[in-house]
């Protein structure tokens, strides 16, 4: 019965546009919403999945896009603008032109790259995290006049969950999540 509910939630989340964002459509870190499973299946090789720890005041979840080999979500800000942050999970990233920096302690298992694009008055930068089987590209595109230090709030808001934890959680429901840390997906992905 639960597997039918999960499948139903996937179909609804991907086919029906909506003005309101359902709680299970937000990729939160400690929970296992259906959208986390979609993200894992979009990039089955990824050993880490981007997620939202907790949004600071003024930030809101803006939506997702899930297609084969890519999972993306956006954050809006009352100060940085609409879609001020775009987070994309994909199998690989182009790190050319980016500078490798030491990842924070909570980013263990990743390599972190920073690519500044423009400075104020319109701040834009890319942050790339590479890890076994995947990459997360965080694109900061702040509106004109937004304070670049808002990046610090995003640092606190975003995190990673180990895909293996999600594989185990789904298995508790008697389901199988294929890919990294689980059986190979049909077609060899």
Image (cartoon, helix red, strand yellow):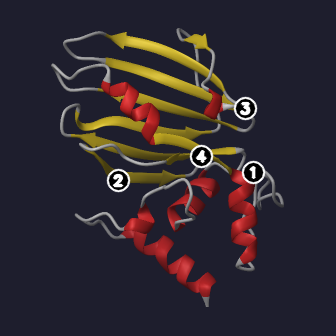
Left or right relative to 4: residue 78: left
The x and y percentages for residue 119 are 29, 9
Left or right relative to 10: residue 165: right
2 vs 3, front mark: 3
Question: Sequence order check: which comes first, mark 4 or mark 2?
Answer: 2
* Viewer-proximal residue among 30 and 115: 30
Q: CA distance from mark 3 to mark 4?
A: 21 Å
Q: CA distance from mark 2 to mark 1?
A: 26 Å
The label shown at residue 63 is 2
Left or right relative to 67: residue 110: right
State the residue position of label 3.
109
Q: Residue at x 53, y 67 (%)?
A: 34
Question: Sequence order check: which comes first, mark 3 or mark 4?
Answer: 4
Q: Are marks 1 and 3 in contact (CB under 8 Å)?
A: no
Density class for disc 3 (Cα within 10 Å; few <14, some 14-19, many ≥20) is some
The label shown at residue 189 is 1
Density class for disc 4 (Cα within 10 Å; few <14, some 14-19, many ≥20) is some
Density class for disc 2 (Cα within 10 Å; few <14, some 14-19, many ≥20) is many
Instruction: Give the answer, above or below, for where 100 lies relative to 44.
Output: above
* Helix, strand or loop under label 1: loop
The x and y percentages for residue 6 are 56, 77
Q: Are marks 2 and 3 in contact (CB under 8 Å)?
A: no
Q: Are marks 3 and 4 in contact (CB under 8 Å)?
A: no
Q: Residue at x 42, y 63 (%)?
A: 25
Question: Sequence order check: which comes first, mark 1 or mark 4?
Answer: 4
The label shown at residue 69 is 4
Question: Sequence order check: which comes first, mark 1 or mark 3?
Answer: 3
* Viewer-proximal residue among 50 and 105: 105
4 vs 2, front mark: 2
């Amino acid at each position: 019965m639960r597997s039918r509910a999960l499948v139903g939630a996937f179909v609804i989340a991907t086919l029906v546009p909506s003005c309101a964002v359902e709680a299970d459509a937000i990729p939160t870190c400690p929970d296992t919403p259906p959208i986390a499973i979609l993200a894992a299946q979009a990039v089955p090789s990824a050993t880490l999945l981007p997620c939202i720890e907790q949004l600071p005041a003024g930030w809101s979840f803006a939506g997702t896009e899930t297609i084969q080999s890519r999972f993306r979500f956006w954050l809006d800000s009352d100060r940085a603008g609409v879609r001020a942050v775009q987070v994309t999970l994909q199998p690989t990233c182009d790190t050319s032109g980016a500078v490798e920096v030491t990842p924070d302690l909570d980013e263990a298992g990743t390599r972190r790259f920073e690519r500044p694009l423009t400075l104020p008055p319109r701040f834009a930068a890319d942050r790339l995290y590479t890890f076994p089987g995947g990459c997360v590209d965080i694109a900061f595109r702040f509106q004109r006049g937004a304070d670049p230090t808002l990046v610090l709030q995003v640092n606190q808001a975003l995190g990673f969950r180990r895909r293996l934890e999600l594989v185990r959680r789904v298995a508790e429901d008697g389901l199988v999540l294929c890919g990294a840390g689980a059986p190979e997906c049909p077609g060899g992905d």
